[in-house]
Amino acid sequence: MNNTQTKQTNHPHIVIVGGGFGGLYAAKSLKDAPVKVTLIDKRNFHLFQPLLYQVATGTLSPADIASPLRVILSKHKNTQVLLDKVVDIDPNAKKVFLENREDLDYDALIVATGVSHHYFGNDQWQNDAPGLKTVEDALEMRRRIYMAFEAAEKEPDPAKRKALLTFVVVGGGPTGVELAGAIAEIAHESVKDDFRDIDTTQARVLLFEGMERILPPYPEECSADAQKALEDLGVDVQTQTLVTNIADNAVTYRQGDDTNTVDAHTILWAAGVRASFMGKVLADRTEVELDRAGRVVVESDLSIKNYGDIFVIGDLANFNHQGDRPLPGVAPVAMKEGEYVADLLVKRIQGKAVGQFTYSDFGSMAVIGQNKAVANLGFAKLSGFVAWVIWIFAHIYYLIEFDNKLVVMIQWAWNYITLGRGARLITEKPSLQLEIESPKKPEEATVKTKETVSV
Amino acid sequence: MNNTQTKQTNHPHIVIVGGGFGGLYAAKSLKDAPVKVTLIDKRNFHLFQPLLYQVATGTLSPADIASPLRVILSKHKNTQVLLDKVVDIDPNAKKVFLENREDLDYDALIVATGVSHHYFGNDQWQNDAPGLKTVEDALEMRRRIYMAFEAAEKEPDPAKRKALLTFVVVGGGPTGVELAGAIAEIAHESVKDDFRDIDTTQARVLLFEGMERILPPYPEECSADAQKALEDLGVDVQTQTLVTNIADNAVTYRQGDDTNTVDAHTILWAAGVRASFMGKVLADRTEVELDRAGRVVVESDLSIKNYGDIFVIGDLANFNHQGDRPLPGVAPVAMKEGEYVADLLVKRIQGKAVGQFTYSDFGSMAVIGQNKAVANLGFAKLSGFVAWVIWIFAHIYYLIEFDNKLVVMIQWAWNYITLGRGARLITEKPSLQLEIESPKKPEEATVKTKETVSV
């Protein structure tokens, strides 16, 4: 009974694992191609991850930045979406093994499963300093940020109250910069009239970065502009600062030869990423090389060594055939890679060859607070309001392309005008990390708790 | 250190427990009164519960229908919001005992903690047939509804697939009618092009009602119109149907002398309510009478017998001084009761008396599908599109009053035009029912799991 509609064709079967920017753009580009496409994701939605920090800080709701994959691909009659998890592959038999469904045979396999947090060997920090990759992560961050003010309002002890009003963001990349700016704005603007026993403008927001400047991959003047803008918002930016321990609501950090500890009830992790599980599967089955972060080192056409029918794209790929370091793990790279592989596969059917993948960098941006940003467009480095306008238009463009999320833009415009954070609901703790196993038989469904955490 | 700002006055202290419609309207009405107000709620937001079914069915996000209490009351300088839980009261010493904070002394106490689900002595049904009272309930319902289609898409066994595509709503009141209509529309419209191996228009939606017609408190012609509209949407309405058992993904029900069982993977409970915990506290401490559902029987001024300084309003109150049965547990009654008690307390300070509470019924409404409703306005009984327009304007009016949620209206208009359900995210299971204990000391915070459930 399975695949009744899609198996009727004898078209080559392209299996895409992961519905992020890379996998989704590959699928979108194959819409009218003479192929059968199966897109597998363990979630039922595509997440617009660049705006996830806005969910974490209570400006947007999860549904504002997520679109059901089935809706996006509803008109792709050659495409089936499966809500499932790939557990293994056999690259010689060309098979993908799923957790809850019979195996799939593929003619080409595109792996785009991305990355997760990396605590540099200190996984025990995870509960104290959650990262930001999933909708559940964002709701957990939101809960912690707003609960800190609530707990401070109740706390009579001044030292404990101070710790409750201290926020540490670890990592000065775009996510860390965006989070720190937003939290400073929450404390100093959004909630300042809402409490009676505490003065939220006394809250401290610390941003720790190990390198000598924040936004290290950006040009130096962008970093300086971003630091200035954050400091104007009240963020205490500490560079050349290495976190050596996180425990008991305190962060220990080293600056040169000095080691200090700051009591902070809310610690957020934006410092590192590690390849997802599929990287290891590919290495085990194909002996492809992984880099130190576990990412898959790909050939110049994004395939993997000795397996011209397996491609790795997006954050999971280490593409080192252009420039002096691998392409960055950002959405535009993933999208271009997805489009490239789709094009390559269609041309291959037609007996045509394509050149190696090349990426034109249209720049990178990070937003700081409500209406400032830094942008490195290559030919120009911008900061302040102009950069923010460019940033917001770039995001409008992509959001609308997906799902006509015009409403999000109106919501946003409204929030920016009013400095409102209407989505600051403290909901029940989602970060128990429930893994819902979609069962073969409904009555055997189980819920597994991966870990339990205490706040 | 506590209450530094609010304790400076010698104004009478009014403590309100519960930030639903009743408690919030009492607080709003006391804005400029010479009183000190403390509003206590265990959540940080007011929930616009009449629209909760739209969150459950993926049209709206939680933040669209919830507003932070601190924001709503931010300009009320005489009012403090506490995120806490009342564990007991002492009506003679006039004290309220909180879980995480020192006791509060009150001059007047307003209890408005509402109701929760009632399984008529069958609490074991709760996991199989969740109810709809909280944001977490709604997200859990949403998860179950959309996961049912996902599981059916994977299921090769026709009988199991049929069970996965069978939805039973128990209870034909407004919530049950609204849920059943929305689920039928999801199956027959919203998702019909999204799957490849199942035909979602074959899904069955059953609505079970014990009385002889749905919407029993409405006039007969409203009930008939609603049933017709539901049937047009494809809902199988079964009246005079008593559910006798829910277990193992099946509902057993009795109709006259016949007993039948239907296999259904998704069973939703909209059949009964029971008073919240504070009802029992009041009965234990004041010997006030409770009705069969545990609601507090109040005097004609909404105070309780022998305690003229304790008031019970909203769904928790049984007000039987008007008409031949208690006032219904709906938002307009709660709002009017909140306003009445606020007015009574202000007048009492001024040495003036007020008459007993009376409620003018402006009608009741239930929506069926995207653009139909039934309305009983007393002087007129309407159904269809006209009733729906009235329904939506009534809701716009209240939503905007709270929080300028114009955006919600635009979102909604957009959804109605496109039949879209952009919020159909399946997120991690919230119904583990985590109880977050806000601790006295931050480092002692614990997370307690009330129950674990398997789907």
Image (tube, coloured by chain):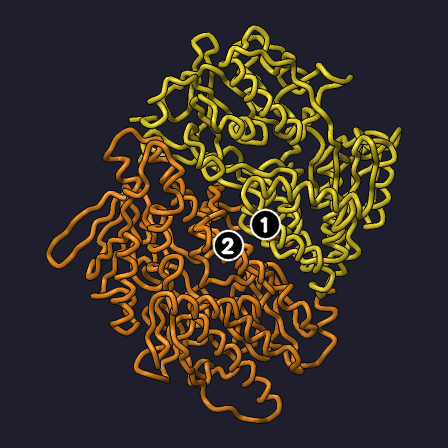
Chain colours: A yellow, B orange
Residue in the image at 73% along x and 38% along y: A176
The kind of residue tagged 1 is Leu
Asked whether disc 1 touches disc 2, contact meaning CB atoms under 8 Å apart, the reply is yes
Q: Which mark identifies residue B414?
A: 2
Secondary structure, mark 1, is helix
Discs 1 and 2 lie in a common subunit: no
- The answer for which chain carries disc 2 is B
Question: How far apart are the two marked residues, 1 and 2, measured between alpha carbons?
Answer: 9 Å
Position of residue A317 measured from the top left corner of the image (x, y, whole percent)? 63, 20
Residue in the image at 40% along x and 70% along y: B329
Density class for disc 2 (Cα within 10 Å; few <14, some 14-19, many ≥20) is: some
- The answer for which chain carries disc 1 is A
Q: Name the quadrant of the N terminus of chain B.
A: bottom right
Q: Which residue is mark 1?
A: A406
- Left or right position of B104 against A251: left
Indicate the quadrant where residue A291 lies: top right
Q: Is residue A70 above or below residue B109?
A: above
Secondary structure, mark 2, is helix
Q: Name the quadrant of the C terminus of chain B.
A: top left
- Residue at the top extreme of this rendering: A306
Density class for disc 1 (Cα within 10 Å; few <14, some 14-19, many ≥20) is: some
Q: Is residue B167 above or below residue B289?
A: above
- Left or right position of B455 against A221: left
Q: Is residue B297 above or below residue B434?
A: below
Q: Observer-nearest residue: B307 or B232?
A: B232
Q: Is residue A291 above or below residue B454?
A: above
